Image: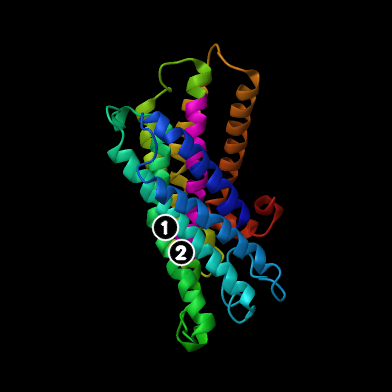
Amino acid sequence: LVMIFFMVMPGLIGGYGNYLFPLLIKAMDLIFPRVNAFSFWVLPWSLWFLMMSLMMDSASGTGWTLYPPLSIEGHPTYATDVVLLSLHLSGISSISSSLNFMSTGFEMRGSVKLMASSLFIWSLLVTIFLLILSLPVLAGGVTMNLTDRNTNSVFFKNSSGGNVLMFQHLFWFFGHPEVYVLVAPAFGLVSLASQGLSGKLDIFGYQGMLMALKMIGFIGCVVWAHHMFTASMDDDSRGYFSAATGVIAIPTGMKVFSWLMTLFGKLKGKVTLYSWLFGFIFMFSVGGLSGLILSNASLDIFLHDTYYVVA
């Protein structure tokens, strides 16, 4: 949770986004500076709550996914409540920041045409779309978890008519788009750096890269249950989620080959940046290939909890 909500998201979206987004659309600043400040100052409080939970009772031993019944009957202490509250605050920060970026992108771009703007701008817009779509679902799941714990509701209690799997669906409907929330700004930065390092006027296959980015964002919203292949899914659902997950490899492959074609030829930059870019492309390709294999539900069931996944 610390790595996702308090390092990668504030760094890539809040950090690089605040610095590069206005520059690339020729704006002075984001459209709502006070909302920007609010989204920043909510985060330290959220992090403080998360850290404080480690010092309460026996801490929250629920894992980062907070699955019930472990997060309800298994850990009835206040530590888990504080973690859930921390997630709420972090979600408020992300939503307010997303609305700010979206308003800035559509209202303050001046003469910059959206269809001709940098891929970093588009990567942030896709990220914002995913956050606005998925964070309210997480907030709903977290709120239901809190009410199950504190007000005797039974959303996730099978013995009383609830469904414990519903939380997994709510969590992963947020959790998988979150993967692309983390990596889409990195895609934009790699595209920006590749273009600058190669000295070319535009990145190779701009329109294809843009369509690939949009397709990754769209398909990423409808494949969440591939995180639940071992959680008693029926065969039809497994078949659909396997196929949909495998399809993501197509736009992702388009992006990788476009980066390589952009970097092909004489490079006009420092070797350090060159090394970082190829390091990213190599690691991303290896990780992506392992993901393509795991998209097969039959293989995933056998490889679940092995070093092939965990490592």
Q: Give, as a single range, the part of the protein colored magenta.
A: 170-193
Prevailing SS of the magenta stretch:
helix
Residue 222 spot, x, y in % from top left: 40, 55
Is any part of residue 149 visible from this angle?
yes
Q: CA distance from mark 1 to mark 2?
A: 7 Å
Q: Quadrant of the N terminus?
A: bottom right
Circle 2 residue:
138
Circle 1 residue:
134
Instruction: Choose between 247 and 217: the one closer to the eye.
Output: 217
The crowding category of the residue bearing disc 2, from other C-alpha atoms within 10 Å (few below 14, some 14 to 19, many at least 20), is many
Q: Residue at coordinates 50% horizontally, 67% vertically from top-left?
A: 168
Give above or below for 113 relative to 308.
above
Q: Residue at coordinates 51% horizontally, 87% vertically from top-left?
A: 159
Identity of the amino acid at label 2?
Leu
Give above or below for 287 relative to 93.
above
Outermost residue toward the front in this view:
34
Identity of the amino acid at label 1?
Ser
Task: Confirm whether the magenta stretch covers residue 244.
Answer: no
Instruction: Choose between 308 and 157: the one closer to the eye.
Output: 157
Report the disc number at residue 126. none
Task: Confirm whether the magenta stretch covers residue 181.
Answer: yes
Residue 241 spot, x, y in % from top left: 45, 56
Left or right: 227 in relation to 29: right
Quarter of image, res 284: top right
The total of numbered circles placed on residues is: 2
Q: Residue at coordinates 56% horizontally, 61% vertically from top-left?
A: 46
Which element type, helix, strand or loop, lies under badge 2? helix
Is any part of residue 242 visible from this angle?
no
Give above or below for 204 relative to 128.
above
| Marks 1 & 2, CB-CB < 8 Å contact | yes
